[in-house]
Image (cartoon, rainbow, N blue to C red):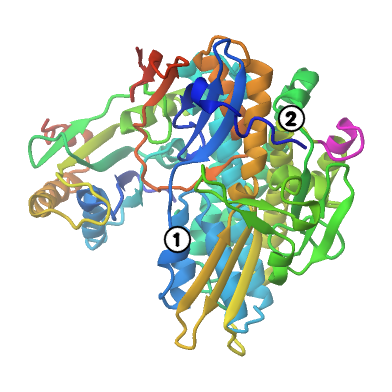
Amino acid sequence: MSSELETASNPENLKRVVIEPVTRVEGHGKVTLLLDENNRVHQARFHIVEFRGFEKFVQGRPFWEVPVMVQRLCGICPVSHNLAACKAMDMIIGAKITPAADKLRRLMHMGQILQSHALHFFHLSSPDLLFGFDSDIGKRNIAGIAESYPDIARQGVALRKFGQEIIRLTTGKRVHGTGAIPGGVNKNLSLEERDYLLKEIDQVIALSQSAVELIKTIYSARTDFHNKFGSYRSSFMSLVRENGAMDLYHGGLRAKDEFNQTIFDHIDYNHYWDYIHEEVKSWSYMKFPFIPSQGRKEGWYRVGPLARINNCDFIPTPLAEKERKAFQEFCGGSATQATLAYHWARMIEMLYAAEVIKELLDDDDLQSDDLLSSGERQLRGVGVIEAPRGTLIHHYRINEDEQIVRANLIVATTHNNQAMNEAVRRVALQYLDGQQISEGLLNHIEVAIRAFDPCLSCATHAIGKMPLEVELFDTGGALIQRLIKDSNGRYRD
Amino acid sequence: MTASLLIFGYGNPSRGDDALGPLLLEKLQELDLSYLELLTDFQLQVEHTLDLQGRERVLFVDASISCSTPYTFSRLIAQKDTSYTSHVMSPMALLHSYIQLYGEPPPSYLLQIQGECFELGKSMSISATANLEASFNLLQKICSKPNLPEWEKFIVV
């Protein structure tokens, strides 16, 4: 593993290229490159340019407000934050949640996984994968897919919509509903709602299978290219069940190193801080987590779909497990390290989510009224789930007045911070080093970032009128080239 | 069963006058009109094409800063979105996507209500509150007319 290109030795003599904002990701970020006079890359960094301060402004609030407040972190995965916070609050109120509440939470979580993965693959990434990384930028979006590949667009729309419907019916709203609460959930699923979802579920499973086939076809059409694009070796971390099965809602922490050897396993996440430390760097608002036993420099890791597929011993649903085995066989029988393999892993997980949804819908517990529980109050709670983008940690401490006094959130994108930076550096070296910059080449960097599906802090109503501006400075700091893309997609100097 | 008329109000309730669309639908909900379905969301996305399926008619309701009168009521024409982003869609672009994905969309209209302040955390402006009442009066009249030709008479651009 390597972090070369993080900091140039003589930055004052280099020209700076900025990609801002990084597009087709959730939230706002930018990439800066420092190049010498021959366009050789000396430094590449992926920056998060927003500061949210959620951990600060929940302080002083009553703990039971927090699961609702933290949903506002994100317009795409509010359910994940709601659930992680609720799991932490379950600990604080001493609740062992009922089987019905557990299953209803799992159902809403699988709806979230399904809609988020469909959004990422079909809306954000398929344009790159189907049209090409340096294809016409005007077509590289879901509308372009609808025009050229209407069947694929219909597939994406139907899958995401179904996930959104599960969220609506389990939380009361399409976005920012409040289904899960400390100690359980506040509603069950009526028979009418269940039957409405059951009507569609077989079709959703079939569409998910088709999505796995699609990425498999795309990937294997250029295996060598996809394997090498922005790739490197790293450790992986995820939750797994006691028996090693994939579980996105609950489990123990497992980490494996770059050679697939276990670093730690079945760790109770209630003591995550013994196994995950965070480093602060002056040039980013986002922290850099690492596994201390591996050292500060070498201990970074990846989370998310690829980590989960690589780390689990099996997937407990038949169709997804068959695809996991096929994926592993394709990769030579062990964990793959390819950055773009995230897409394939993500589609296997989407299939898993669809299968779990069907299992849950057939369970009578979803109509139970035994939805809430409580116990002996504690002053600290930790909740961890596998959100669509990876391991999500919520940690709170309260005072005797039931107010939050401390909060620590480690979101998936933070875990992947160093990994995304590494991918940017690999692509910069592979494709931009010594080249004349172009939008297509810069999109290669964005493709590598997109593979992680980062959520760079999400504004629900961030109006999509962000210009893209690339500036090239000479070694003396003078501007020599500027390319501006306006809100209508037009380019000008 | 899918209601024949869909009224879709969109906007962010936390952004001052951007709440006009959802708020108008809240007022309409009190009338308990069984033949129509009311939907709200923060913004339009391609998934909303599925909400249009099986409808006889669709009415979108949105706040607008460029609207020069308290409200406008217009017939929508599908139009390709030429911007680089699909993060948020116009109703015209949504109809264009509908055509690409599912064929001819239902006749669709747009009620735009004039707003002036869309800042996060702001309450609704005085003028927008008045425009909300005016557009509610119009919407009640529109909803009382079931036939398409009668809707056309309400067009004010």
The structure residue drawn at horizontal position 32% and vertical position 28%, both measured from the top left corner, is B92
Residue B150 in which image quadrant: top left
Q: Position of residue A163 (x, y in %)?
A: 57, 49
In this rendering, the answer to whether B154 lies above or below B122 is above
Q: Which residue is mark 2?
A: A231
Q: With A233 as the anchor, is A193 left or right in this view? A: left
Q: Quadrant of residue A275?
A: bottom right
Q: Is residue A187 above or below residue A21?
A: below
Identity, as a three-letter code, of the amino acid under mark 2: Ser
The chain ID associated with circle 1 is A
On screen, residue A308 versus residue B145, left or right, reads: right
Q: Secondary structure at mark 1?
A: helix
Q: Is residue B148 left or right of residue A281?
A: left
Q: Secondary structure at mark 2?
A: loop
Magenta stretch: give its range: A327-336
Are discs 2 and 1 located on one and the same chain?
yes
Checking the image for residue A54, the label placed there is 1
Q: Is residue A195 magenta?
A: no
Residue shown at the point (74%, 35%) measured from the top left: A2
Q: Is residue A142 left or right of residue A329?
A: left
Amino acid type of the residue that numbered disc 1 sits on in the rendered structure: Phe
Q: Chain of mark 2?
A: A
Q: Residue B18 at what x, y percent from top left?
A: 24, 48
Q: Position of residue A167 (x, y in %)?
A: 53, 56
